[in-house]
């Protein structure tokens, strides 16, 4: 069993959502958190850079226990539910997510998945004779920018480690929800693996509490710039080839926009990342 909430602002955010349907949905005990993310490939043959991209979907499905005092958000807990049939569907495609180890976790990487900007994706969970669902539209791929607002090249000019700015600033247009990640690269081939990032502000999609926070209190991810501390994000110059920079922009849908049998804190997310390779010597 995992804690769903550990900060007082969560309940305030929930109750701040107007409408009588809000209070009805607070009585529901099933919670769904679905995430679809595209990570880009980077290919620049003339610079010997070839990094693979991928598309991945994850779902947490479980039940909420609000305890003896439902007004105390810090006491809410979630328990994952196994045995569900979990699918992601979109115009022209469908994919089935498989159990991913932890209770209530379902996932799929690659395979039948496809990310098409502007396409509506529906997360659909069938369990105990009921269907739980949420639909989100995939946003356009973002443009990764430097501190001045200039687009970063797919492969940047090599830089000496001592010349890396501190902090290293990433920028993007708008204030949609966005996450950054920096990954150390041992060579110019392979993949930019955000799950092994040296630093990131992305929520842990396997943690129901982190995903619920994203739906109810997303201010930390809406800033136009992100300042990356050198010691944390770029910890060493060697023996690495350099670093892969990722900026993921997402659309999220939650609350009363999901099927009416879901807990209010449920939600679904779709997003795509922009990438830039920074060779360091």
Image: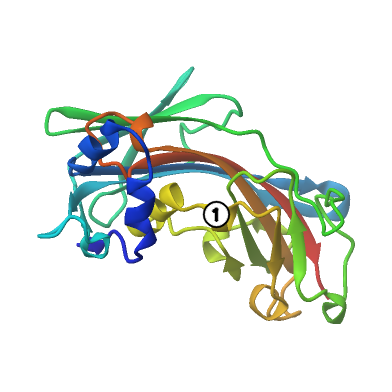
Towards the viewer: 19 or 103? 19
> Residue 83: which quarter of the image?
top left
Badge 1, how many Cα within 10 Å: few under 14, some, many 20+? few
Return the x and y of residue 259 as percentages of the image width and height: 29, 29
> Residue 139: which quarter of the image?
top right
Residue at left 18%, top 44%?
A: 29
The quadrant of the image that shows the C terminus is bottom right
Residue at left 35%, top 65%?
A: 7
153 sits left or right of 208 in the view: right
Towards the viewer: 99 or 261? 261
Return the x and y of residue 163 as percentages of the image width and height: 87, 77
> Residue 208: which quarter of the image?
bottom left
What residue is shown with label 1? 219
Towards the viewer: 268 or 81? 268
Vertical arrangement, residue 48 with respect to residue 26, above or below? below
Return the x and y of residue 132 as percentages of the image width and height: 26, 31
């Amino acid at each position: 069993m995992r804690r769903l909430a550990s900060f007082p602002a969560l309940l305030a955010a929930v109750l701040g959502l107007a409408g009588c349907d809000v209070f009805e949905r607070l009585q529901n005990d099933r919670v769904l958190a679905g995430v679809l993310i595209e990570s880009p490939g980077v290919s620049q043959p003339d610079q010997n850079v070839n990094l693979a991209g991928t598309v991945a979907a994850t779902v947490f499905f479980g039940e909420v226990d609000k305890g003896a005092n439902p007004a105390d958000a810090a006491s809410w807990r979630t328990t994952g539910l196994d045995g569900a049939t979990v699918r992601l569907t979109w115009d022209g495609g469908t994919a089935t997510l498989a159990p991913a180890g932890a209770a209530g976790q379902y996932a799929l990487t690659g395979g039948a998945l496809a990310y098409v900007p502007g396409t509506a994706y529906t997360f659909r969970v069938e369990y105990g004779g009921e269907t739980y669902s949420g639909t989100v539209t995939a946003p356009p791929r973002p443009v990764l920018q430097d501190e001045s607002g200039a687009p970063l090249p797919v492969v940047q000019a090599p830089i000496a480690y001592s010349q890396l700015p501190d902090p290293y600033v990433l920028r993007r247009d708008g204030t949609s929800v966005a996450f950054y990640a920096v990954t150390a690269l041992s060579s110019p081939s392979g993949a930019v693996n955000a799950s092994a990032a040296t630093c990131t502000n992305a929520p842990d999609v396997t943690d129901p509490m982190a995903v619920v926070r994203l739906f109810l209190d997303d201010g930390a991810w809406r800033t136009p710039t992100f300042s990356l501390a050198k010691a944390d994000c770029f910890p060493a110059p060697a023996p690495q080839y350099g670093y892969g920079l990722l900026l993921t922009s997402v659309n999220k849908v939650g609350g009363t926009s999901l099927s009416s049998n879901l807990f209010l804190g449920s939600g679904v997310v779709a997003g795509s990342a922009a990438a830039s390779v920074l060779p360091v010597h």
